[in-house]
Amino acid sequence: MWCLGLAEEERVSKGDFVLVDYTGRVKETGEVFETTVEEVAKEAGIHSEGRRYGPRLIIVGEGWVLKGLDEGLEGLKVGEKTVIEVPPEKGFGPRNPDDVKTIPYRVLRSRGIVPRIGMKIEVDGREAVVRAVGAGRVRVDFNPPLAGRTLVYEVVVREKVEGDAEKIKALIHRRIPVDPEAFEVSVEDGEAVIKVPREAMYLEGIQVAKRGIASDVFRYVPNVTKVRFVEEFQKEEKKT
């Protein structure tokens, strides 16, 4: 599944499981705001040590990515680089002037916030960016940072994932940061059996992850009606 051998004329259709590398830039500035490619993230200064880089699983048409990118994947040829332009209405939406508010300086100070221009803050459970500070008032912007921006995605569909067992491995990889090939998966008579490797057994949140995987499998792999996780422990021989 994870090799990148590609069928030259293979194209993407709605509902396909695909592994996609992409880099998103703001059209007006060229600024990189997200990428699946680690080297690009480092070059752009947005690298995160805790993030997993590499081709991302997308089920086309399921809304796992921005609408404009999702729609743009349909019809692409596997292995071919392309550029998808996403207008604001199919990205983060247009800017809403009503989402720019003025808040008394003392209100923020009472909450332990010392506002500075460009600072990200939380007000009443909503994220905002400080746009101006002065005369006892602070202007904050609740619009998403990329609202109103046209986005440009450089995209390569690396592979289409075929077969129920391989699709299940791909769904596992979304939720558990372990090599998907470490999981043994078989599907027979509507039952998926997933053998969990030792390196995944003790991960924090593993039980929640397993419930999420089962839910994903029922939704996206219609041939499966039962999911069984198997964990094996072997007795270690005492050394004499």
Image (cartoon, grey):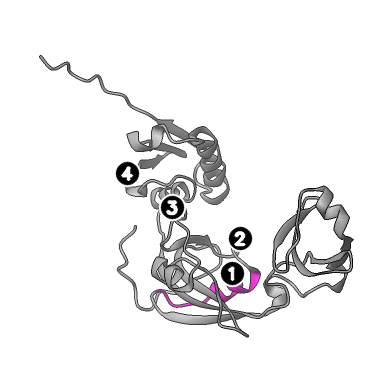
Amino acid at circle 3:
Ala
Question: Which callout, 4 or 1, points at the residue further toward the start of the chain?
Answer: 1
Query: Is residue 50 highlighted in magenta?
Result: no
Amino acid at circle 2:
Glu
- Compare residues 52 and 213 and report the one nearer the observer: 52
Q: Residue 230: horizontal and vertical position, in percent?
A: 39, 30
Q: Give the range drawn in magenta.
A: 67-78
Q: Which of marks 2 and 4 is in front?
A: 4
Residue 183 appears in the figure: yes
Tag 2–tag 1 contact (CB < 8 Å): yes
Q: How far is mark 2 from mark 3, CA to CA? A: 15 Å
Dot 2, crowdedness within 10 Å: few (<14), some or many (≥20)?
Answer: some
Q: Residue 77: horizontal and vertical position, in percent?
A: 44, 77
Q: Mark 3 points at which residue?
A: 170
Q: In this view, does 13 lie above or below 186?
A: below
Q: What element carries label 2?
A: loop
Q: How far is mark 4 from mark 1, CA to CA? A: 29 Å
Q: How far is mark 2 from mark 4, CA to CA? A: 27 Å
For this view, does 119 lie left or right of residue 191?
right
Label of residue 182 in the image: 4
Label of residue 240 in the image: none
Amino acid at circle 4:
Ala
Question: Which callout, 4 or 3, points at the residue further toward the start of the chain?
Answer: 3
Residue that appears at 45% across and 67% down: 20
